[in-house]
Image (tube, rainbow, N blue to C red):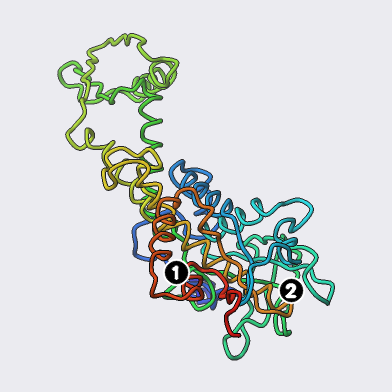
Amino acid sequence: MVFDFLWRDRDGTKAPVIEEKASATGPVIAYHSSGRVAWSPRDTMSLTRAAFAGNPVGFRAVKLIAEAAAALPLVLQDHEQRFAAHPLLSLITAPNQAQGKAELFEALYGFLLLSGDAYLEAVHSGEGVPMELHVLRPDRMRLVPGADGWPVAYDYMVDARKHRFDVTGPVSPICHIKSFHPQDDHYGLSPIQAAAQAVDVHNAASRWSKGLLDNAARPSGAIVWKGAEGQGTLAQDQYERLVAEMESNHQGARNAGRPMLLEGGLDWKPMGFSPSDMEFHQTKEAAAREIAVAFGVPPMLLGIPGEATYANYQEAHRAFYRLTVLPLATRVTAAVGRWLSAFAGEQVELKPDLDQVPALATEREAQWRRIAQADFLSAAEKRRMLGLPAVPEEGEGE
């Protein structure tokens, strides 16, 4: 609410008149930055531009996770068998005309990492398995809560057009996958939100490096004027001429190394790097490591120097799959499997096939050997420990 103080004549005198103005959007505006340090905006589009499209560390971290998770072989099974052919497997293999399985899941994982939310739409004819699956952009989706707080619809908005998905039916046309957020009931928290300050530092460091290169990769200096006695400052026209000559003849990469001609008592005093300037690259590398840690990618895999947590690249690669890729892929595929089970009318489970992941081949081989040598376990118990359906062997139960 704003009060404007206007002055109006009243019987030959002037008196203040207060006009009250209120914005129509005032009740729904929250001032998040009041009294705080100004950082880059924290909305999904701004973070995506800053941390993915405009930052090589964030870009590579998201691509590395999304591509690795999307490339995992998937298996579909119920409590009795693992399916070699199934309508849901056919749908996942060719979800729509523009995408295959890898492209669909890469987009799904990418949006989940960038926004904390991922949305999958089912194009359904009304019976059986959906005809197509499509990934929807999270920045265009808005959840509509009901009186009890649970979602009753999703609004997908593009420019001035809006389409509403009703999710009150027996099967929802939208599968909403979200990351854990301790302060939001409806939307997830993305890794780039946690790493936003590190992204700002890293991007600012890159801009500083670019500015230094534009200045011939040398620190700045000062022009000292030693005027005649009684003349403490330059005349205005002299100052403007000096500034114009500096900008046109001695700044930028194209003027690197050009000698400077000083006259009229002017002297150049170069300024060297301070100890804090010398630590600048360490600050940038520290910010890059923070971004990698937020996404769960070992900095060694991103080529960030100064990281010695893992003994070698192979160990870091194995930890990346075990701690980041597999938990993400297991959670997302389980949610998609439960959602598609409602369409198919049967309870099935969709999950990564760990035995076909090259990075985990050594661990899986050791696990198979250890379980196979456990004579005190039955065949059904061994299958359950390996994630296989508990199919009874021939002769059992007779």
Residue where numbered disc 1 is placed: 31
Residue 304 visible to an observer of this rendering: yes
Please name whichever residue, 248 or 39, is drawn nearer the observer in this view of the structure.
Answer: 39
| Furthest-bottom residue in this view | 148
**CB-based contact (under 8 Å), mark 1 and mark 2:** no
Looking at the rendered structure, the number of numbered marks drawn on it comes to 2
Q: Position of residue 24 (x, y in %)?
A: 61, 75
Residue 66 % position (x, y): 54, 52
In the image, what residue occupies the spot 61% across and 75% down?
Answer: 394
In the rendered view, would you say 342 is above or below 307? below
The relative height of residue 237 versus residue 87 in the rendered view (above or below) is above
**Looking at the image, is mark 1 or mark 2 earlier in the sequence?**
1
Q: Nearer the viewer, residue 344 or 176?
A: 344
Q: Residue at x 22, y 15 (%)?
A: 267
The Cα–Cα distance between marks 1 and 2, rounded to whole angstroms, is 29 Å
Residue 100: image location, x then y, percent: 71, 52
Compared across the picture, whether 297 is left or right of 112 comes to left
Q: Nearer the viewer, residue 105 or 255?
A: 105
* Image vertical order of residue 117 relative to residue 50, above or below: below
| Residue 381 x, y percent position in the rendering | 47, 75
Question: Of the numbered discs in the image, which one, if any, rests on residue 164?
Answer: 2
Q: What label sits on residue 77 in the rendered view?
A: none
Residue 304 placement, left or right of 222: right
**Local secondary structure at mark 2:** strand
Other residues around mark 2 within 10 Å, as few (<14) / some (14–19) / many (≥20): some
Disc nearest the viewer among 1 and 2: 2
Residue 15 seen in this snapshot: no
Q: Mark 1: which secondary structure? A: loop
